[in-house]
Amino acid sequence: MKIELYIERMEQYETGTMTAAERAVFESELATNAALRQALALFQQTNEVIEQGIENSLRSQLRTWKEEVVVETPMTVTKSSGGRVVRMRSTWVRLAVAASIALLVGWFGVRWAHSQYADEALFAAQYEKPTDSSFRSGSAADRPLQPGLDAWSAGDLNKAMLFFSNISPDDDHYAEAEYYLGHVALQQQQYDLAIAAFGLSAQHGPSKFKEKAEWNRVLAYLAAGHTQYPEFQAFLGQIADNPAHSYQAQAGVLQGKLTSVWR
Amino acid sequence: MQTSQWTDDQFLAAINSGGQNRQAALRAIYDDNELKRKVIQFVRNRQGNTEDGQDMFHEGIIVLDRNIRESKFRGEAPLKGYLYSICRFLWMNQLRKQAHTTQGAETVLANEPDEYTPEITMIAQERKDLLNSLLGQLGERCQRILELWKLSYSMEEIATSLGFSSADMARKAKYRCHVSLVELVQQNPEIQRVLKY
């Protein structure tokens, strides 16, 4: 049986596109032509195959539409034979976004907290630069360091450092000069010089600058990032353990922050 | 256009005309959330779950589509009521197949008034598998050409959709595919046996 012989006419017959005359001729041929009858039977059976394909495609299309709706719906609850199942496609997306935000917030939070406990931050929080008014206390005769202080006030740090450095250890104002030198050196970020200057000031003997120098020496170590140095720990501990020290409270706070988990 | 904006006649005309009109009509039916909820509710109240209800709604649309195209439904009853009764019938039929729920299903079914009697072609799994196997042998492109042709897409639309250079090329391809399919059926006595019923 050559199906090609009949297929066009069978299609027209099945789809109803034949004229009445053509249809009559075709049907009379069907009555006498067994091969045509057999071909038509096969042709009709192919309809079922094609319909199955259409059904598959429509089912697939419906699933796609359903998926679209599920994505748009925040959460629908379904029940399977084994129990309830929560459909959470978009909820997962929301959770993922929330988790990402939480992670970001957490990350930035940790970073922020860490930054607040960094050496530089602790130094900035504790350090107090002497005010200009403190430079003007006492009479002119009591202010032999005034040229250095003026240079410092004017922002001429090199001149100020040179001036304070030239004050002799025999000078009555040596401890004070070293104290100011330490501050200028800190401002210049010459931390080793600052540590040495504050140290000399503190060790020179009893003076109103002793405790300030001791505390600022500790801060100079902090600014330099030398918090692991044994001498730093020792100097800080001496202040923190001395209830009579003017900076005991600050030292205690600093000790606590230096051992914080945020560092 | 939403379902509420379609009349039953428009649905029938769109599905019968095929092509994009059919697609739009089916989408509008699918988007009828009130009807969908009703079907899901029916299934949930009768030993099913939401997923089952969704599936029945899908299967109901598939049956409705074919019944309209084959003029088994001509709008004698309201279309939504007809679709609902198809879905209900499909679910009850499925319940009957489940041995452990047969008793309950029968009771439930007996209590359900049948407003409409949808004509449903139930395709047995074996038959379905054979048809799908034949479709596999035919190839995806031929399947698609024949489906679109059957759904009254024009040869121009088929050419555009499947990337043929012209409607004439699409027509030739459709002819070859149809001949191939008839030959495949001819060479497969098992298919012929199954398709006789």
Image: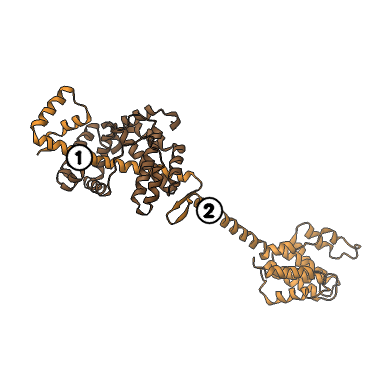
Chain colours: A orange, B brown
Q: Secondary structure at mark 1?
A: helix
- Identify the residue shown where x is 79% and y is 71%: A248
Q: Which mark is residue A95?
A: 2
Q: Position of residue B78 (x, y in %)?
A: 39, 30
Residue closest to the eye, B115 or A108: B115
- Identify the residue shown where x is 47% and y is 37%: B34
Determine whether A19 is above or below B180 in the image: above
Have a look at marks 1 and 2 and say if they share a chain: yes
Q: Amino acid at mark 2?
A: Leu
Q: Is residue A177 left or right of residue A100?
A: right
Can residue B195 be seen from the camera position used here? yes
* Chain where mark 2 sits: A
Q: Is residue A12 left or right of residue A199?
A: left
Q: Amino acid at mark 1?
A: Gln
Q: Quadrant of the N terminus of chain A?
A: top left
Q: Secondary structure at mark 2?
A: helix
Neighbour class for label 1 at 10 Å: few (<14), some, many (≥20)?
Answer: many
Q: Position of residue B56 (x, y in %)?
A: 38, 44
